[in-house]
Amino acid sequence: MKRAILGLTLGALAALAHAGGAEVATEVVEVTAQRADPAGDAAAASEGSVSAGQLENRPLLRPAEVLEAVPGLIISQHSGDGKANQYYLRGFNLDHGTDFAVTLMGMPVNMPTHAHGQGYADLQFLIPELVGRMQYRKGPYGAAVGDFAAAGSASIDYVRKLGDSFAELTGGSYGYRRALLAGSPQADDGRLLYALEATGYNGPWVLPEGLAKLNGLLRYSQGSQDNGWSLAALAYQAKWSSTDQVPERAIDDGLIPRYGNIDPTDGGQTRRTSLSGEWSEKAQNRWTRANAFVIDYRLDLWSDFTFCTLGCEPGPGDQFEQADRRKVYGFNAARSWYGDLAGRTAEVTLGLQSRYDDIGNVGLYTTTARRRWGTVSQDKVQEASLSLYGESRIEWQEKFRSIAGLREDFYGFDVVSDTARNSGRARASIASPKLALVFGPWDRTEYYANAGYGFHSNDARGVTLKVDPDYRDPGYGAALAASTPLVRAKGYELGVRSAIVPRLKTSLALWRLDLASELVFQGDAGTTAPSFPSRRSGIEWANSWTPWAALTVDADLASSRARYTFIDPGQVPGTYIPGSIGKTASIGLAADSGGKWSGGMRLRYFGRRPLIEDNSVRSPSSTLVNLRAGYRADRQLRLSLDVLNLFNRKVSDIDYYYASQLRNETAPVNDLHTHPAEPRSFRLSLRLGF
């Protein structure tokens, strides 16, 4: 397959070069979740985009739940609201983002070699009201996306112009309060988009969360997204106390209430500031675009998942701190040519991407009540990547086109560790060919066949690791195997997208994804843990029905199967992958006639998951319903009411199974650890336009 894809790409490049860039009138058709016709530039049945209008009547508990507009994607949380969410998609517990890549205004959100987990994607700084468009892809089939995109990716862009400037105040249950000021006045020949957000929240927890979040944005732009430029500055900071997952036995035995905690000093503080710029120029026969960014980031996170295995009375307890200090620099550039290839419409894109993470400290410390008493690891890391890609789109026949791509990624890791033997340098590269074949449309129906390679990088500390630095571990000082720097993923997909039924858009995808054998660096322990080759497969069905202009109904169903394809029975008891999601469903209604009333309702089903490799312990499923009702008093004044967890379901937000030890216990106990979903709550918002 690699040779075939390479041949198609190079052949198209050569042909266009000989054609001298001949101008060809090409119609650009957006691929959206509400497409009127399947014909266009879609490369897979499972890709699409979400508009601001589709998000307007969507009730949200957390900012990152904007991503639940991606069919089959689930967002949850096992800690405080200042920490990155947990993501689930296509048979993955993606942790905080390991195999799902997210960008905002061209800037990466995922953090490699992060203190709390590889690919950590914290979207708490997202302002949902500013989202203008979100494009998503599933599977490793797009040449323009690389690291962390094996399961999928989402590219989010803010609007450049708001309909009206506005001030919005929100108050709600459990001490929720939020103020948002946003506008986009004319400034010389361009637009100045500004936003200032302040949020506070205690939550239903016995330990008040005390979330204090400040968030700001300035973006100046001229022209359009295709022909124009913009500069943006973002600043975000937050601090919070957290109620992490707790053992079920503590609740069942009456030691703590349902929303209680074990360690009242858990929590965190974080900060992210950035400066970025984008430029684009589009003509009839070419399109050139580029962006660059600088990010300054820090995090201090205090967690306690096992409580007293090191002893509590006397003893320091098991709390630990993860610290991250870094600066991120990067740029992306691409150029597309539209031309004629022997009488066939063709498009070729060449792209260059680069990123450099200068990590001044990524540390793991043992703490008691947030006071450090030991250092497990304290490293300085420099991690750089350079990526080249090419992609050709050729319309071979009226009802047959291909999209062939080739991507090459180069990585360099440089680690200076406080454990000298764990210092070192490493280099790695990986090639990722991709191919899509599209047939149709026939009767407003298109058919897709996709195959492609992808990857995710591993934590640089794991790549150079030689000995166990964790003095809490019985194996302290023992030799350990290093992680594979770049882990191969291989995916396949067959799909169909149809608009044959009037006012109904539907897509169906059958997929499979294989991950190579790897070792995974665990930020909570500072060591590597074994993993094995795996295979995930499944089916997804997404539907959008507009029975009349004022009402949209969408329904998404997904089912997947995740298994290790090879295991060491001495290390794990079975082939099930802990935390892997099986079944999900989402059903939503959005009503808006443009009159005084509007609203939306969403039902989300989060299926059962194996929590141990032999499937002997499983998490329960959960079903939640959220509601939004809006009233426009006039053009400037709007009221909205969100009711979250409408039926007050007592379900889990997330579940784990592992050993922990409470103060009254003499040894660790294997148990299910849960973070309950928040109970029914109300949030009332008043927006005044000006």
Image (tube, rainbow, N blue to C red):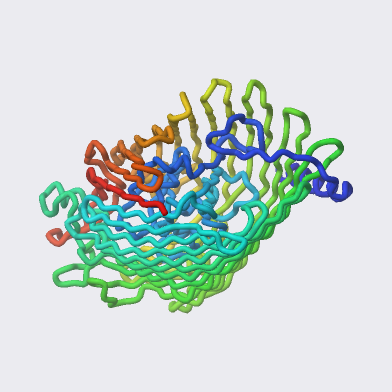
Q: Is residue 614 visible?
A: no
At horizontal 60% and vertical 64% (from top left) the residue drawn is 188
Q: Nearer the viewer, residue 615 or 254?
A: 254
| Horizontal side, residue 310 vs residue 90: left or right | left
Query: Which sits in the foreground, 303 or 161?
Result: 161
- The location of residue 77, given as percent across then percent down, is 33, 51
Residue 349 in picture, x, y percent from top left: 72, 50
Of residues 285 and 6, the one drawn nearer to the viewer in this rendering: 285
Give the residue drawn at x 64%, y 21%. Answer: 443
State how many labels appear.
0
Q: Residue at x 30, y 67 (%)?
A: 302
What residue occupies the far left of the structure in this picture?
Answer: 254
Q: Quadrant of residue 604?
A: top left
439 left or right of 108 in image: right
Q: Is residue 39 left or right of residue 270?
A: right
- Is residue 14 something one can see in this rendering? yes
Q: Quadrant of the N terminus?
A: top right
Q: Is residue 91 above or below residue 36?
A: below
Name the quadrant of the C terminus. bottom left
**Rendered location of residue 677, percent (x, y):** 26, 46
Q: Nearer the viewer, residue 572 or 510?
A: 510
Q: Position of residue 170 (x, y in %)?
A: 30, 53
